[in-house]
Amino acid sequence: MRFDRRAARASAGAAAWRGCATALIAAAGLIGAGPCHADEPLHLTLESARALALQNSPALQAAGYSARAAGRVVVENQAAYLPQLSAAATSVRVDGADSQVDRNGVQQQLSSYITAGALNTSTLFNRTAAGVQLTQLVTDFGKTGSLVKSAKASYRAAQQNADTVRASVILDVTEAFFQTLQTQITVQIAQKALD
């Protein structure tokens, strides 16, 4: 059996979120959203607890961002089908007669270069060159198509992961809601028994 780091992180994150969800629901039930009035307790419904959890879940936000990033990889791989344009420029200026030096008995001329591109630099003549290149993929024997298919599969997997995380958050907050409700009922029964 293989160790899956993503699954381990997801289960650890779900356990941490379950504890946070319980604390969140309990705190919302005790504190309230506005000013605290003794005669106005906050009534947190299951739907509002779910909405609050979905809105504030970092795991769900991370899964959504991962799905969006995977979607952009599809577009990135599809870009190989588009034409590509590149440009290059080279300029060489040979200085005057005062820039000659004697190297091992041979007079050589110094020159200054401003280059970009792949032209050979000559120290004999002034010159400027520029070029533009347009390339279009004709065939790569299925490489780009396979990359696009793979990226689309990864995107679908990331979307499924986001859906799974969303369902997990809803399940965790539902469990926490009913555990909190059970605890509140237990406290009420204990108070009635003491009265």
Image (spheres, helix red, strand yellow):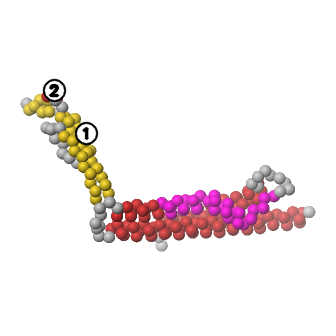
Instruction: Say what secondary structure mark 2 lies in.
Output: helix
Instruction: Say what secondary structure mark 1 lies in.
Output: strand
Q: Is residue 43 visible?
A: yes
Of the numbered discs 1 and 2, the one sitting upstream in the chain is 2
What are the residue bounds of the magenta stretch?
41-69
Residue kind at label 1, given as amino acid type: Ile
User: Main SS type for the magenta part?
Assistant: helix
| Furthest-top residue in this view | 98
Quadrant into which the C terminus falls: bottom right
Q: Position of residue 99 (x, y in %)?
A: 16, 29
Identify the mark at residue 114; answer none if there is no mark.
1
Q: Is residue 34 left or right of residue 165?
A: right
Q: Is residue 82 left or right of residue 194?
A: left
Q: How many marks?
A: 2
Residue kind at label 2, given as amino acid type: Asp
The answer to which image quadrant residue 175 occupies is: bottom right
For label 2, count other residues whose C-alpha is less than 10 Å away and answer few (under 14), some (14-19) or many (20+). Answer: few
Proximity of marks 1 and 2: CB atoms separated by less than 8 Å: no
